[in-house]
Amino acid sequence: MVIQPTPLQECGRIGAGLGVHLLMKRDDLLPIAGGGSKLRKVLRILRMADRPFDALVTTGGTQSNHARVVAILAAQNGWRCRLVLHGDPNEAASPSGNLLLMLLAGAEVEIVEPDRIAEEMASAVSSLARAGARPLEIPGGGHSLAGALSYADAVAEAAEQLQGAVPDFIVHASGTGATQAGILAGCAAKGWMTRVIGVSVARRNPRGRSIVCTMKDQAADAIGVTVGDERVEFLDEWVGDGYEHASKDVLATIRSVATTEGIMLDPTYTGKAFLALRDLVQRGVIPSSSRVLFWHTGGLLNLISSRYATTGLLP
């Protein structure tokens, strides 16, 4: 699959209200059911695989965007797919959102306790190999050098669209850290001094920032640039109660962006990141009149499958 550049959309009404020039990179519109940043990562991982394969194995939560992308790409290519997921086993009885799409795509799904993931992943790879398949194991979330490099490539794509204008800030949701690492390396490759602010959706510091630093070094080395650790801004203030838990302020932010610009954020990833953007502008961390690029990494299926639809998302 060859993907075309995703839109770079000006958000004039929200930007005017905040006093900044706000642009949004719409990776939520990438061409796969549900969209989202994981498509860039998985395609790069598949291209960089060091051996032939005809089956995919990966892991994630029961509402994992990454696992959904892997399942759909496997179906598109006629490959077998085994997904070792963690979460509520009862979801399988009445699947929705990402889990529903995984199952519709024909993936073989097993839901296990988190401490059994490594064991069951190894078992899935072994069983596929015994059946005559050539399985490729993909890290959860696409957290790998290839995944990071996909976002160095994405910065080059955005640079073409910006036609010489350099953002002062890039703000995005940061999960496993490969997206932020790739954006940092991509900015360095373009010679941009843009501040890249990753808003954590789950991990706390210092661990979260340390993981981004490690992956950033790998990505920078791979493309021949240098990115100092001081460039890594990994903010954990908006994690709240953790992954897949959203505060009332996050839900209000989702409603506001949908009403004002017709753009859908989600409670797990982009809602937290956009709330952070607003707070940072209001505090003066992002000065007025700055050129701000918000990278929309997707999450629509997290929005429409989540419990927030009935417990606080709508006023």
Image (spheres, grey):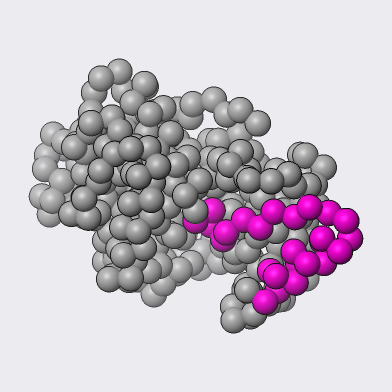
Q: Quadrant of the C terminus?
A: bottom left
The structure residue drawn at horizontal position 12% and vertical position 54%, both measured from the top left corner, is 283
Q: Nearer the viewer, residue 138 or 65?
A: 138
Q: Nearer the viewer, residue 20 or 292?
A: 292
Q: Residue 3 location in percent, x, y?
A: 57, 29
Q: Nearer the viewer, residue 180 or 302?
A: 180
Using residue 229 as the reference point, say whether residue 150 is left or right of it. right
Using residue 192 as the reference point, say whether residue 266 is left or right of it. right
Q: Nearer the viewer, residue 258 or 92?
A: 92
Q: Residue 29 location in percent, x, y?
A: 53, 35
Q: Residue 120 location in percent, x, y?
A: 70, 74
Residue 226 visible (yes or no): yes
Task: Name the chief secondary structure element in magenta.
Answer: helix
Residue 254 visible (yes or no): no
Tell me if residue 214 is in the magenta stretch: no
Magenta-highlighted residues = 119-143
Location of residue 117 with respect to 288 vertically, above or below? below
The structure residue drawn at horizontal position 40% and vertical position 42%, both measured from the top left corner, is 222
Using residue 224 as the reference point, say whether residue 96 is left or right of it. right
* Snapshot quadrant of residue 83: bottom right
